[in-house]
Image: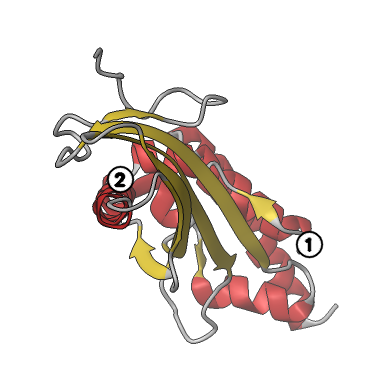
Amino acid sequence: MTSSWVERNSIIARARLTITGARVRGWHDAADHLNHFLGGSGSKYTIRFSLMNQESASARRHLISELNDALEAAEKFLQNKNDINIVTITENSAANVEGNWLYAVGLYRTWAKANAKQKNDECYSMTWSFSFRDNYDWDLNNGLGGGFVSDREMALLHRYGRAREFEMVGEHIIKIDWKIGERFDTGADISGDETRRPMRRRNRR
């Protein structure tokens, strides 16, 4: 029995304890993502992106900023048209800074596309698709970590073939009706993906 074999099994045992601890704290996404890593398939994983945008304050701020930019762009480009498609030309970086979503995702990238319509001189509607992408990976040169394991130890498991890093993806679809000049939380009528609970209570018009 080699020391490296013992080390690997020790890391795996502590990683599984970390999963248990995360579930006790209610950090189910952090636990699920780590469990998928330890499963070793390396398959693409769809995260609960709309839930992240509801629960993570930093993710929510990023979403609101991107959505308000899209509303402003739609008003500008719909001046001489009734219907347009908008697509971001670069991915934007963002970060979760605490709790469940810090350990489940941490840093990530987003981009968006939308179809916007002008209903009359003052009123607009838009379906906005906000997309997420990130790699669930670990830094071999980082001794920091969470729970009972470090980044370096997780990177070693990947290198040893005992776990596998993977791509994470997600999509949050939002529908908006608004009057010229309105934005998120300043009058725009916003609903989240209908397959999940609404991002916020809809205003009555």
Q: In which quarter of the image is the C terminus?
A: top left
Q: How far apart are marks 2 and 1 (CA)?
A: 31 Å
Residue type, mark 2 in image:
Arg
> Would you place residue 162 above or below residue 2 in this image?
above
In the image, is 65 to the left or to the right of 119? left
Give the residue at x 27% y 45%.
57
Is 58 left, or right, of 166 in this rendering? left
Where is 192 relative to 34, above or below?
A: above
Residue 185 x, y percent position in the rendering:
18, 33
In the drawing, does residue 92 fall left or right of residue 204?
Answer: right
| N-terminal label among 2 and 1 | 1
Residue 61 spot, x, y in % from top left = 25, 49
Residue at 72%, 81% in the rendered image: 159
Expressed as whole percent of the image width and height from the top left, the position of residue 124 reads: 31, 36
The residue under label 1 is which amino acid type?
Gly
Q: Callout 2: helix, strand or loop?
A: helix
Display coloring: secondary structure
Near-viewer residue (181 or 51): 181
Q: Which of 2 and 130 is in front in this view?
A: 130
In what element is the residue under mark 1? loop
Is 46 in front, or is 16?
46
Q: Mark 2, residues whose alpha carbon is within 10 Å: few (<14), some, or many (≥20)?
A: some
Q: What residue does disc 1 label?
A: 40
Q: Name the residue under label 2.
A: 60
Q: Quadrant of residue 51?
A: top left
Q: Can residue 73 be seen here?
A: yes
Which residue is drawn at the image coordinates 49% and 33% (left, top)? 24
Q: Quadrant of the N terminus?
A: bottom right
Q: Nearer the viewer, mark 2 or mark 1?
A: 2
Residue 77 position, x and y percent, is: 32, 57
